Amino acid sequence: MRLTTKGRYAVTAMLDLAIHAGKGPVSLADISERQGISLSYLEQLFAKLRRNELVRSVRGPGGGYQLNREQQDIDVAQVIDAVNESVDATGCGHTGNCQDGNVCLTHHLWCDLSSQIHAFLSQISLADLMERNDVRSVAERQGRGHIASFEDSLISAKVTA
Amino acid sequence: MRLTTKGRYAVTAMLDLAIHAGKGPVSLADISERQGISLSYLEQLFAKLRRNELVRSVRGPGGGYQLNREQQDIDVAQVIDAVNESVDATGCGHTGNCQDGNVCLTHHLWCDLSSQIHAFLSQISLADLMERNDVRSVAERQGRGHIASFEDSLISAKVTA
DNA sequence: GTATAGTTGACTGTTTTAGTCGGTTTAATA
DNA sequence: TATTAAACCGACTAAAACAGTCAACTATAC
């Protein structure tokens, strides 16, 4: 199991997408600048996020990415899974085939740990993250990045309608 | 944050040490055979465990390693920390210096996750692991490796006295 | 003095990370 | 219609970590 900048970048980028929703697609260039993540690296990550149907893309000028589901229907575990950072702490991938066909001494410990982590991360949605004070204040700092309010959603709904 | 075979090996080896306690020092060769871990690799891991005072060594024939504290005073988090697999999910090492001097959007999320994992792992001692049915049965399977009972401790206490 | 076992350091192949670079399509707009 | 903004795609790379090997050295029980 590993949790590195890869998974952290993915979650951060998805949250950036959520924050700037309701104003049309968000370009990777914008995310790159706001979050300090390499543009080319973001491209790689979003290829995986798109394959996992967490985002959809709009090509051409003015294009970018949008969340493919409601913010409350995307949780952190899904995002991390999508970029291939498994949240599995076992070495055998839960097969129990850790020591020449049998489970190793500590197999069940790692199974337990995996469930703990997965339970924790899958219970947190992008919507939940946006409610957090620390997220709101960082978003505020990151420029005119205002968190999309309910009114924004209404406006964008009218525009796209 | 990463949790790979390194940390798993370390915990497994420490548990093997606990299981075979009360019969004098346990050699790395024994652990290697029972747990299927490369001897040379175990040497590297135990160098770290010793530096962290989790085990003590006895050199020469009949030598080996022993736990340096009571089984209930060694928890899984300590073992993983000792082999340099930090249980920190943040990228900044909790400094909050994730994005040019400031905290990144998701800093607090990773802090929360880290505490969760740490709380979970530090609440489990080697003594706890030994009580588990799955551990007992695997130990049974791994040869004459009987779990050291209270009587064993008494015997070894007399012998060493 | 010999065998056992820990101790140490250097070395190695492989995989993953965290990118970079160059090009190609797609589509909006001037 | 040409330009341009953006997604898309594949190959490449440096650095690190992982997992392990190997050889030499030291301490000690017998």
Image (tube, coloured by chain):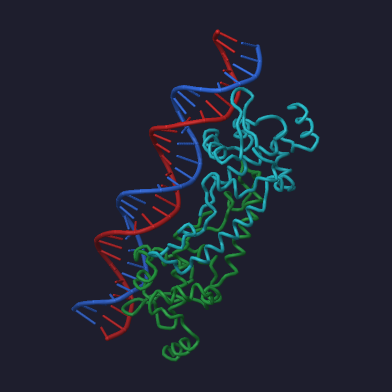
Chain colours: A cyan, B green, C blue, D red
Q: At 62% from the left edge and 26% from the top edge, which residue is drawn?
A: A63
Give the residue at x 69% y 37%.
Answer: A142
Residue A144 position by quadrant: top right
Query: Which of the pair B64/B13 is nearer the observer?
Result: B13
User: On the image, which quarter does residue C26 sit in?
Assistant: top right
How far across and down, in percent of the image, does residue C24 sit?
47, 22
Instruction: Locate residue A67: give its quadrant.
Output: top right
Please indicate, yes or no, whether residue B43 appears anywhere in the rendered image: no
Q: Along the horizontal axis of the image, is B21 left or right of B132?
A: left
State whether residue B81 is above or below residue B15: above
As rendered, which of C29 and B75 lies closer to the eye? Answer: C29
Quadrant where the C terminus of chain A is found in the figure: top right
Residue A132 visible in the displayed image = yes
Q: Which residue is situated farthest in the right direction here?
A: A151
Along the viewing direction, whichever of B145 and B103 lies nearer the viewer: B145
Q: Give the x, y percent position of residue A42.
A: 55, 36
Q: Is C8 drawn above or below residue A144 in the view shown?
A: below
For the point 36% across and 74% down, the residue is B27
Q: From the viewer's perspective, is B58 left or right of B120?
A: left
